[in-house]
Image (spheres, rainbow, N blue to C red):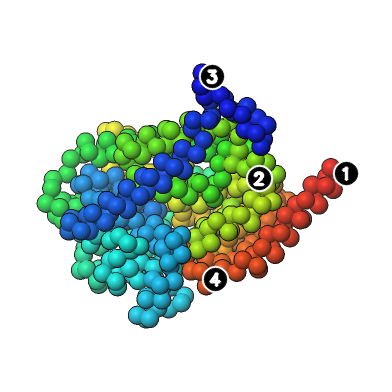
Amino acid sequence: MGKRNAAVDMRAGRRTTGAAGVVGRGRREGNRLMKEFFAAQSAAAEEGRQAAYSFVMGSAAEVLRAFDLPVVYPEINSLQTAVHHEALDYLNRAEDYGYSTDVCGYVKADVGAHLDGGRLLGGRIPRPALVLATNTCLTYVKWVEIWERIYGCPVFVLDLPGERAASADGSVREPHPDDVAYVRGELEELVALCQQVTGRSFDPDRLRESMAETARMSEHWREALRLNRRRPAPFNAMGDAITFMGVGNAYRGTPEGVRYFRELSEEMQAKADAGLGSLPEERFRLHFSGAACYPAFRAFLDLFTSWGGVFVQSEYLSYASGGLHLDLPYDDADPLGSLARQMLLASQRSYTHLPFSHAQLAEECREWSCDGIVFHSTKSCRTTSASMADFREYLIRQRSIPSLLIESDLVDPRYWSEAQVKNRVDAFFEALESQRAASRGA
Ligand code: SF4
C-alpha cells in the first residue's frame, strides 16, 4: 500500500492503511446508482416506453433484460415512500379507495401511487407492458391482479414448487430434476410472452451475458458477507446493506452491478484488514430476522447502535437479494435450465424455509459469532413474520441464543412506537450485559 492511502482512525486508534480511500464508497455509490435507477424509471414513464414489473424474490430480471425491458420493482418503490416519510399519504389513498388496514402496506403504498396516475415521490412509474410474479409470497399473486385490472396488461405467474422434503438443518439442497424441468418450461412460456409483448425475437446470448453478470455479482457479494464474520464486522447488515440490496436488485445481471459488488467486496476487505467496523466500538454482534423498519429506519437502527450493537448478519439479505448470497450454478449451454435451478434454490430461503428457518438462524448465529438475535415482526408482512415466536422458543431453549421480538411495520408509520420499542431494546441489552458480566465473573 502506498503512503498516500495511509490514515489513522483516531476514534479507534487504529491504522487504516489502504482503507482510507474506499471506506463509505459502497454507500455513496449505492445511493448514486439508486438515484439513477429511479431517474431512468421516471424517464421511461415520461417517454411512454415499455416496462416490466417484477418482484425481488424471483425477479427473472435476466430474461426481461434480454428483451431490453426496464424492470420496475414495486416493493422498492413502496419502501421508498416510507424512507422519505411519505408513506401515509399513499396508504390513506389506498384505504380511502377501499383497501383494508390488514392488506400488506407495500401493496397499498403502490396502489396509492397508481391511483395518482403513477406519480411517486416526485417521479413517475411507467405503465407495465407485462407483470411477473412468483408464488414465493402469495400476496404477489393478488398484487399482480390489481395492475391487470388497472392497465389490462398480461400477467405471468411463475409457479415455483416447494422443496419435496425440507432439510432439517435448513441447508440449501439441490432441487429435484423434475422441478427444474417444470420451471424451465415455464420460463420458455415467459420468453414467448416477452417476444409477443415486445415484438422482438429472443437472443439466448443476451440471457447468457446477463446470467454471467449475476453470477459474478453473487461471487463478490458472498465474499463481502464472509468478511462480515470478522470482528469487528465491516458493515451493518441492516444499515448500509439495505442500499447494497437495492443495487443488487436494480442492477441485477448488468456490468454496473458487477463493478459495484466487486468494489464493495474490495472495500470490505480493506476495512477488515484495517480492523475497521461499522461503529467505533462493536460491543454486541447481532443477527436480524424479519423485514426492515423503513418508516423509522435511522431511529430503529440507532436504538441498537447506541448500545454498540451491530447486525452482522440478517435473514433479509437472503430473501431480499433474490439468491445473490448463494453459489449460483450457471451452465452456459443451458441458460434457461440454469435460471430455473437458481430460482428454485433461491426460493428455498424465501418460501420453503421461511416458516422453518430456526436451524439455519442458529447456524448463522454460530458462524457470524452473534451474541443474540432480533426478530422484527411486521404487521404488513405475515410471510416473513410467520413462526417467529416458535423460532425464539427454539433458539432460547435448545441453542441458548438470547433473542428479542419487537413489532412494528415495514412501511406504515402508524405501527411505530419508539418509546415502546426502546424499552424492549434497552431491556434486551441490559440482559446481555449482565449475562456477559456473569460469565466474566465465572
Ligand atoms: S406480504 Fe411481505 S413478502 Fe409479501 S409482498 Fe408484502 S412485504 Fe412483500
Question: Where the C terminus falls, by quadrant?
Answer: top right
Q: How many residues crowd around disc 1 within 10 Å: few (fewer than 14), some, or many (20 or more)?
A: few
Q: Amino acid at mark 4?
A: Tyr
Q: How many residues crowd around disc 4 within 10 Å: few (fewer than 14), some, or many (20 or more)?
A: some
Q: Which residue is mark 1?
A: 441
Q: Is residue 412 left or right of residue 309?
A: left
Marks 3 and 1 sit apart, C-alpha to C-alpha, by: 45 Å
Disc nearer the start of the sequence (2/1): 2
Query: Depth-wise, is mark 1 or mark 4 nearer the camera?
Result: 4
Disc nearer the start of the sequence (3/1): 3
Disc nearer the start of the sequence (1/4): 4
Marks 2 and 3 sit apart, C-alpha to C-alpha, by: 33 Å
Q: Residue at x 35, y 80 (%)?
A: 97
Secondary structure under tag 4 reads helix
Q: Which mark is residue 285?
A: 2
Q: Which residue is mark 4?
A: 415
Disc nearer the start of the sequence (3/4): 3
Count up the numbered dots: 4
Q: Residue at x 76, y 56 (%)?
A: 430
